Image (cartoon, grey):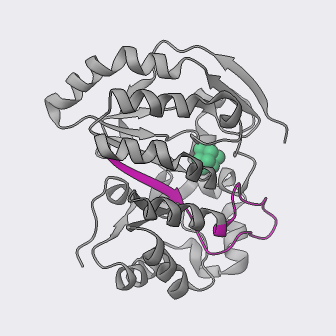
Amino acid sequence: MAVTVSQTQVRSILTRTSGFLRTVCSHSLQPYQGCSFGSALCGIGCYVRHNGLLTRGRAWGSFLEVRTNAADAYQRQVVVERRWARRNGHFSIFLSSSTDPFVPQEKKYGVTAAILAAMCDMPPDELILQTHSHTIAQYVDRLTTLAAVCNLRVHISIESDRDTLPGLPAPASSVDRRFAAAALLRAAGIRVVITSAPLLPIADPEAFFGRIAAHADAVVIDHFIGGDGSSKGSRTRRTSLPQAMASVDAACTDLAYRDRMVDIARRHLPGRVGVSVDGFAGRFLLP
Ligand code: SF4
């Protein structure tokens, strides 16, 4: 699907969190609106595609609005928002919850790069950087600088050891490239968390979680049931994802599958496994 790219100026870029993210962080930050990975594998089960206010009738993956002044907006807002956040805890930012900070267009527009530079000067207390793209590894120097001034956690989504599911598009980045990015960042001393969300059918769970244990500090596991913001995963059930999942493993569309994967993960990463929103918030199950 072709992506229509437009440029826009925003008045504010730091959004106080509500709903799912409320216990995870004080603010979210979206350098783009829309996501050019929406036509890739992750876009099929992407929870954001169901947000009609954001898509306004446009197909998910067909549009990307570049927020060209995002770094300036951050600098304008940061003092007031930091003060507000610290009244109830700490100033923590989730970047990003409804787009990917490292979409291919980032290379041209550099919106995320400019935000990260602004954060080096005026850091949040905590930054959670969430991506599906291996290209985050190109920013290792900037992230190392940032990790010295705030509590940085990089989340790299790897939902399964499979690169494809029958009838669905390929991922934006292969599983191997995302693991390589995790390994590179972790070797640089950056805290790396693998997010298996939504959990997809895993061919060899022992090997998969063993690989995560070797290349990351922790894993977060979430299932579309309980994780997609709807009752019993009804939003995701309206997409082609559950059928594709079931075609390779009939049991994996049940919440019991998540619990079995959690048990295996806990053996490989004792004390470093988080489930659903607790995991995104950095709250892990006891060893
Ligand atoms: S990268 Fe994230 S926001 Fe973009 S389509 Fe995939 S899951 Fe959705």
Which residue is at the far left?
87
In the depicted structure, whether residue 139 falls above or below residue 122: below
In the depicted structure, whether residue 269 falls above or below residue 279: below
Could you tell me which residue is drawn at 65 percent across and 68 percent down?
175
| Magenta residue span | 150-176
Residue 23 is one of the magenta-drawn residues: no
Residue 101 percent location from the top left of the image: 56, 40
Q: Is residue 82 left or right of residue 160?
A: left
Could you tell me which residue is drawn at 64 percent across and 25 percent down?
66
In the depicted structure, whether residue 90 falls above or below residue 109: below
Task: Tell me how many marks there are.
Answer: 0
The C terminus sits in image quarter:
bottom left
The N terminus sits in image quarter:
top right
In the depicted structure, whether residue 172 falls above or below residue 162: above
Residue 153 is one of the magenta-drawn residues: yes
Q: Principal SS element in the magenta part?
A: loop
Q: Is residue 198 visible?
A: yes
118 or 26: nearer the eye?
118
Residue 204 percent location from the top left of the image: 59, 86
Could you tell me which residue is drawn at 37 percent across and 54 percent down?
280
Q: What is the quadrant of residue 190 in the picture?
A: bottom left
Q: Is residue 145 left or right of residue 205?
A: left
Residue 197 percent location from the top left of the image: 51, 61
Q: Is residue 57 left or right of residue 94?
A: right
Q: What is the quadrant of residue 219 in the picture?
A: bottom left
Q: Is residue 90 left or right of residue 190?
A: left
Residue 138 percent location from the top left of the image: 59, 49
Q: Is residue 150 visible?
A: no
Could you tell me which residue is drawn at 54 percent across and 67 percent down?
199
Which residue is at the far right?
2
